[in-house]
Amino acid sequence: HNHFGLHMPSLPEGRLCPPVPNRCNYVAWLKQLVLSNSTDLYRFCNAGDASQNQYRGIDIGTGVSAIYPLLLTTSLFAKCSKLSCNDTQSTKWKFLATDIDPVAIESASKNVHANQLQDEISVALVEQSPSSSTGNVARGPLYAAMEVAKKESMFNQVEDADAKQNDELGVGNYPKFDFVLTNPPFYATVEEVITPRAGDKRSRTDISINEGVYSSANVESEGGEVGFIEAIIHDSSFFQHHVTWYTSLIAKRSSLDSIYQKLQSVEGIWGNRGQIRTVEFQQENIYEENGEIKKKEHNARVRWGIAWTFERAVGRVRSCMVRGGLQSFVVSIPVSDDVTDAINEVSSRLITYFGGVRESLKCIDEYRERNTDGTTNGVVKERCITVIEERFSGASTSHHEQDNRNLPHEGHFVMDAFISIKNTHQNSSDNVDVEVCLEIFAHTTYGMMFVNKIRGQMPGEIGRTNRRWRRLLKRQLASSSSSPLSSKS
């Protein structure tokens, strides 16, 4: 209550009492994910009304506390952080909070009413339905929540241009949501819950079977958090565009790796990097000593978050920016009366190089804005050579077998080579240093492999300092010195 302004009158014994800071990290990340829809995705559900900063989501397995909906609807998370917002605007959240446990529903409802949020948070009991399928219809925890949602007046479906198509797919009667969140059951069997902890041998008395165990109906699937999230992935393949972001908190790194690998083969996602987001949450253990806040070393609690969407990401989405490796290089150009000649020369070399690469590439020579220091004051407009694959430059192009229909319009990757003068020497015999800064966005494994190949060759090719250029320049020099004109002189 002191830190978050929440009233929690109901926290029954023997049930999970979640550590709030880690949950706070999750909802803070989720909020930024949802608010970035307009810049990161070509289209999104807009289930609430993004123009009015209204969003709605589902909390699967809300527990006795309903902590996630309560946190997002507090004033702490109400302030809008979009660039288009002013300080007077606030973000409004509508939630469907579901659980299979009647005790959890009763307790969560008390907490919601204690904070007078019953108009923003609808708490609903759902039937326990282990993941199974009948034909093309998913039957997992998300499906159970959506069945309840379509009966809730709070989430009445708004007609849109896709309504007819959605009806044909069999999902037109379900409402749309901006996100789904869940903190899945950790254990796969009851035996794991009743077994004392491996470290201190204490019994697990603070958790119920419903909260801690998930057993998949599919014998080929895992239980626990991996099986639970896989069941939501199965459901999401059915609902697809009815939810913009499907998300989950994850307790183990091995579970994160397993889920990430699973998403590589889901139709409509296919491992596209702009459609899968991961994050690591580190919550330090702090304590007070003599009035001073201190941190315990080497004792951070680590959790992970994962999100996926069936919406197409834009070409320059920040999550696909290639970090590490070659980011910039300097080319020395002989000085002339006009330093812009040096920029023109480097631009010409870049276009010539890309044109000679084995794959067919398209170069766009233009001026683009670049952020040099991460602030609005650091935005400058510079000469830029943008590179994409030729087959993505027009609507009538044909794609290769590596392509999928959810790629950005620019294809597997976008490379922006920004060109600027780094240093102009006072001595006229010196060269002009021209800096080439690379901003690369790779959306697939194929795109990453391709850009790593061509960017590694760029300093030597553009600077004309690699072995190929040294040999070529040596032959040119030898040819020039042996020409009849030089012999006569």
Image: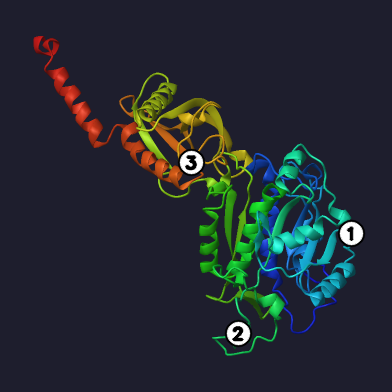
Q: Are marks 2 and 3 in contact (CB under 8 Å)?
A: no
Q: Distance between the residues labelled 2 and 1?
A: 40 Å
Give the numbered dot on residue 42.
none
Badge 2 amino acid: Glu
Q: Distance between the residues labelled 3 and 1?
A: 45 Å
Please, is residue 121 above or below residue 446 in the view? below
- The quadrant of the picture occupied by the N terminus is bottom right
The residue identified by callout 2 is 191
- Asked whether the viewer can see residue 283, the reply is no
**In the figure, is residue 391 to the left or right of 1?**
left
User: Residue at point 22% right, 32% down?
Assistant: 470
Residue 413's spot in the image, x, y percent? 49, 39
The residue identified by callout 1 is 119
The residue identified by callout 3 is 440
Badge 1 amino acid: Asp
Residue 356's spot in the image, x, y percent? 34, 28
Tag 3 secondary structure: strand
Closer to viewer: mark 2 or mark 3: 2
